[in-house]
Amino acid sequence: MRLDLVIRNGTVVTASDEFEADVGVAEGRIVAVARDLAKGDQEIDATGLLVMPGGVDAHCHVEEPEYMGARLADDFVAATRGAACGGTTTIMPFANQLPGKSLREVVEDYHGRAQGKALIDYAFHLILSQVSAPLIGQELPALIADGYRSFKVFMTYPGYMLEDAQILEVMDAARRGGALTMVHAENGHCVHWLGQRLEARGETGLGAFAESAPPAVEREATHRAIALAEITGAKVMIVHVSSGQALEQIRWGQDRGIPVLAETCPQYLLGLGPHLHEPGWEAAKHVCSPPPRGSDDAAELWRGLQQGAFQLVSSDHCPYRFAGTDGKRSQGGERPHFRKVPPGLPGLETRLPLLYHEGVAQGRLTRQQFVAVTATNPARVYGLYPRKGSLMPGADADIALWSQGERRILRHADLHDDCDYTPYEGRELSAWPVVTFSRGEKVWDRGWVSNAAGRGRHVGNRSPS
């Protein structure tokens, strides 16, 4: 068999194994994982490198409508470029339901935004903010039949928040179609009530952002989402879990056999909460929803990862710029107001290196667990496996080669998104993906990044597993 590419002498790491082998690629697919493969048209010596599946970032925001006067910095060109440089080869952003447009029109519009721009492959979730009888009875079933099998609902945010009766309808429709309901679990009524009282007392700094959405707000909503899933029989994914209290509810549901899955993100594993109390505008670089917590919650989340309560780690990449008239500082003024700073952090490119350093290098995760929660499990959950998240023969040749042991300081100046900061500036890292292949084509190589925007393809979901 003629091989287009052979990656030789690397340490292959999958979600279950680690071994020395060569990886052979032909026509964009992996065709062999073995020793002493025949010579390929292109040869890569991976001696001393880890050979892992390219990451699957199953929760990121790209080219969505503006919110609170701010606009996302990354289009599909910038987002997929940054992802590839960080070892991710598939992203799953959200087609956002828009007033006056059918879901079908929204999906077609989002395809148009990605085509001709994406460097790596992608699939879409759908955000539901308006629930009606036609949507439940016609639009969702038709889109599910066409392969769109994951829908996100919000329990908070003005303009997005759904009431329980609406969420029940969405969950029931998803269950009937074999789809997955993703839930942003914070009690929006409590957030509003607490925020009003903080504001009345003149407590408007960004430290009040966390006080308006304490762990109890997330705990209650998480339990309620699980109860709604139990009542409807739906499979549910609790996204971006930030607190030990919410994790406790997730374990409660899982222990009772309720089909509840869970995701967390680097910003919660790193305990960024104290940064919200920094003076002035610097704290705005750490504003996201739910708010980042402290070290005790981070320790609980690490235990949840180790014990399998979390199935995946995503970035929740939401790249509002810090400066400018359309960024986090769009409201201006010398002092930020906690209700006027749009929540969201950039993180597509840094997700994997941060998790490897804080997880694997610190002894919290094995390499196999790292691959599982960043590539294999996301692909399984969202119906992309084994084409994505795998190094088995027949899978797309989405491969990242990792160097480890060299100390590197994370700087936004070295990143490739269109945002203007990283909340992780100055952190030390001990591993980084040095080469990334997408379907056998090199898209990142030690500082070089491909300019082949538009080569990325939409990858249709199947029924989530």
Image (cartoon, rainbow, N blue to C red):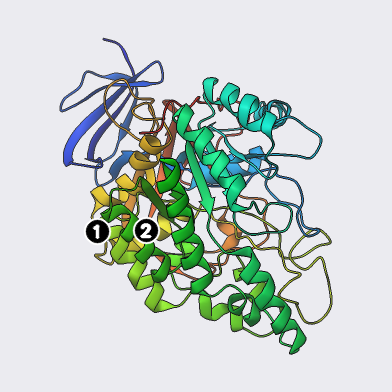
Circle 1 crowding by C-alpha within 10 Å: few under 14, some 14–19, many from 20: few
> Which residue shows up at 16% across the image and 25% down it?
36
Q: Quadrant of residue 130?
A: top right
Residue 331, label in figure: none
Measured as percent of width and height from the top left, residue 68 is found at 78, 60
Query: How many marks are shown on the rendered structure?
Result: 2
109 displayed left or right of 278: right
From the viewer's side, name the closer residue of 180 and 30: 180
Measured as percent of width and height from the top left, residue 313 is found at 41, 52
One can see residue 292 in this view: no
On the image, numbered disc 1 is attached to which residue? Answer: 307
Q: Quadrant of the C terminus?
A: top left
**Residue at the bottom extreme of this rendering:** 201
From the viewer's side, name the closer residue of 116 and 219: 219
Whichever of callouts 2 and 1 sits on the residue coming sooner in the sequence is: 2
- Residue type at mark 2 is Ile
Measured as percent of width and height from the top left, residue 288 is found at 60, 65
> Which residue shows up at 31% across the image and 59% down it?
251
Question: Is label 2 or label 1 in front?
Answer: 2
Residue 54 vertical position relative to residue 219 in the rendered view, above or below: above
53 displayed left or right of 327: left
On the image, numbered disc 2 is attached to which residue? Answer: 250
Measured as percent of width and height from the top left, residue 147 is found at 52, 24
> Which residue shows up at 56% across the image and 63% down it?
186
- Residue type at mark 1 is Gln
Residue 296 vertical position relative to residue 36 in the rendered view, above or below: below
One can see residue 252 in this view: yes
